[in-house]
Amino acid sequence: MVKILDCTIRDGGHLNNWHFSDEVVFATYNAAQKSGIDYFEIGYRNFFSSKDKGKYYRCTDEILHFIKSDISCKLCVMADIGKANIDSFCVYDLNNTPVDTVRIAVYPDKLNEAFDFCSKLFDKGYDVFLNLMAISRFEETHYQILNNWNRKNILKALYFADSFGSLYPSDIPVIADKLQNLGYKNLGFHSHNNLQLAFANTIKAIECGVDIVDATVYGMGRSAGNLPIELLTAYLNKNGIKKFSQEAYLALIEKYYVDLFNEYHWGYNVPSFASGLFDIHPNYTKSLATEDFEQLFDYAQKVHQKCPVHFDKQSLEKILN
């Protein structure tokens, strides 16, 4: 049976710099528990460039003291390779930390660093997910590196992320088969909605046997946002997976997330569409503020060809100048 990871606070934090109130975080976790959700990703545990970012960007054990992990809805944090430090994770013990699962996010050029981080976390006793960001930009050399790793078995799941919302449903089985053929049997999928395909892509992932899929409350997330978790749970419930429900999420939306939406306005727009269409980081198209859409698309095409997969302001400035 497919599992669901609620990443509302972690991904939604890109909109408000992770300045969520403890009340909203606790209420969202409570809704996840009531709805039968398997994992709750409460934020990042990053320290690089943390200026002006709220505490759910850092998510130390001290910060999370008010949360009690529930075995039925495990607490998760994400750590970005290059922004996180292994020393910020204690040896796993529920008396010391409410976090029992860590997801490591990596771009294709830093896979070996991610493998080392995953191994150290596993040796400390954590369940570990490896999250391949920008899977649409992986090349054969990157897949070969994945193939050569000799500790694949330590992962609870290998995630592939549609980071720029550029994938189509027909892409999902191709990627899933490729990763499984490399020896990664348990897979996860993270969608974005730049081309309005987060729901369709996630359904296709479930049909392909992906073990864990992501969603967020009201679709809250970077750029065009994510798959709404209340939509996913309703779909699964209607199709016979009665473990999940959406009533608690609907009440949560009315109490908190309508106001958050009115303040931060995530969702589909022209820059997010261009990000998905040209398969580039949404911060590039967000930075290319222009009402000349022909010019926007021209810049976006140049970004795809000349800029790094991750957002790099200096590379963008070279194109603009």
Image (cartoon, rainbow, N blue to C red):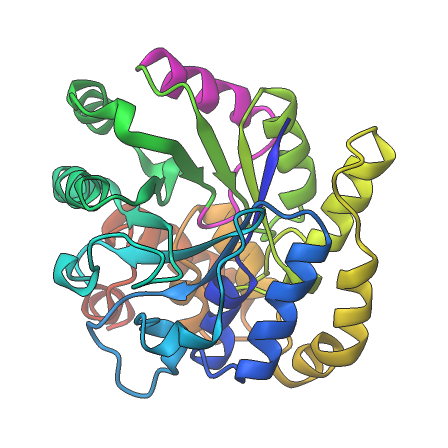
Q: Residue furthest right?
A: 238
- Position of 38 relative to 178 (above/below): below
* Chain part drawn in magenta: 163-182
Q: How many labels does the image show?
A: 0
Instruction: Pinpoint residue 93: horizontal percent, then vertical percent.
Output: 29, 54
The answer, for residue 269, to whether it is visible in the render is no
- Position of 175 relative to 299 (above/below): above
User: 176 or 290: nearer the eye?
Assistant: 176
Q: Give the residue drawn at x 65%, y 56%.
A: 33
Instruction: Pinpoint residue 236: horizontal percent, then vertical percent.
Output: 77, 36
Instruction: Pinpoint residue 52: horizontal percent, then vertical percent.
Output: 32, 88
Taking the image as shown, residue 228 lies to the left or right of residue 159, namely right
Picture quarter with the N terminus: top right
Q: Give the residue drawn at x 30%, y 72%.
A: 60
Instruction: Pinpoint residue 134: horizontal percent, then vertical percent.
Output: 37, 44
Figure quadrant of residue 217:
bottom right
Taking the image as shown, residue 163 lies to the left or right of residue 57, namely right
The answer, for residue 52, to whether it is visible in the render is yes
User: 103 or 93: nearer the eye?
Assistant: 93
Q: Which residue lies furthest to the front in this view?
A: 95
User: 257 or 246: nearer the eye?
Assistant: 246
User: 225 or 303: nearer the eye?
Assistant: 225
Figure quadrant of residue 220:
bottom right
- Position of 179 relative to 102 (above/below): above
Picture quarter with the C terminus: bottom left
Q: Give the residue drawn at x 36%, y 11%.
A: 181
Q: Give the residue drawn at x 22%, y 19%.
A: 147
> Is residue 24 inside the magenta stretch?
no
Taking the image as shown, residue 66 lies to the left or right of residue 116, namely right
